[in-house]
Image (tube, grey):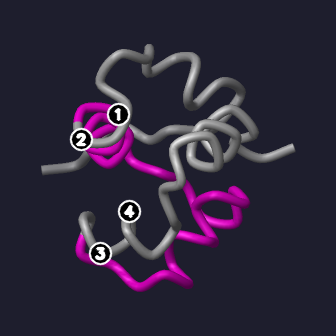
Amino acid sequence: MALQNLKAEMRRKGITQAEIADFLGMTENNFCLKCNERIPTTLDEARKIQMKFFPSMRLDYLFAGAQVLESSD
């Protein structure tokens, strides 16, 4: 299942998809698609989420099993 660790940690901390979507500058629907792996998350997005909302957690734990794309600058 898609991004189960991230979703579980969001629930534990009471962080909503809307909060993360707003932080990333995208719609809640777009972030929902990323959470369900309908569209890929970029490495830059994953790092931003981890640093802002889950600084004590490892990136590889939060995004375990997910397809995370290298950011294209």
Determine the residue located farthest toward the right in the rendered image.
1
Closest to the observer: 43 or 55?
Answer: 55
Quadrant in which residue 63 is drawn = top right
User: 36 left or right of 63?
Assistant: right
- Disc 3 on helix, strand or loop? helix
Residue linked to disc 4: 20
- Tell me the CA gap for discs 4 and 2: 9 Å
Which residue: 24% across, 75% down?
Answer: 25
Q: x, y (%) of residue 15?
A: 48, 56
Residue span colored magenta: 25-51
Front residue (pair 33, 58): 58
Circles 1 and 4 in contact, beta carbons < 8 Å:
no
Secondary structure state at the residue bearing disc 4: helix
Q: Distance between the residues labelled 3 and 2?
A: 12 Å
Tell which circle, 1 or 4, labels the residue nearer the N-terminal end: 4
Q: Does the magenta stretch include residue 42?
A: yes
Q: Is residue 70 above or below residue 35?
A: above
Task: Give the CA distance from mark 3 to mark 4.
Answer: 5 Å
Question: Given contact means CB atoms under 8 Å apart, are the residues at marks 2 and 1 in contact?
Answer: yes
- Secondary structure, mark 1, is helix
The answer to whether residue 55 is left or right of residue 9 is: left
| Magenta stretch: helix, strand or loop mostly | helix
Look at mark 3 in the image and give the residue it sits on.
22
Distance between the alpha carbons at the discs numbered 2 and 1 = 6 Å
Rendered location of residue 73, percent (x, y)? 12, 50
Q: Which amino acid does label 1 sit on?
A: Gln
Task: Kindly identify the amino acid type of the residue bearing the numbered disc 2.
Answer: Lys
Residue 4 location, x and y as percent? 75, 39
> What residue does disc 2 label?
52
**Residue 61 percent coordinates (x, y):** 58, 18
- Please name the residue that numbered disc 1 is placed on: 50
Query: Mark 3: which amino acid?
Result: Asp
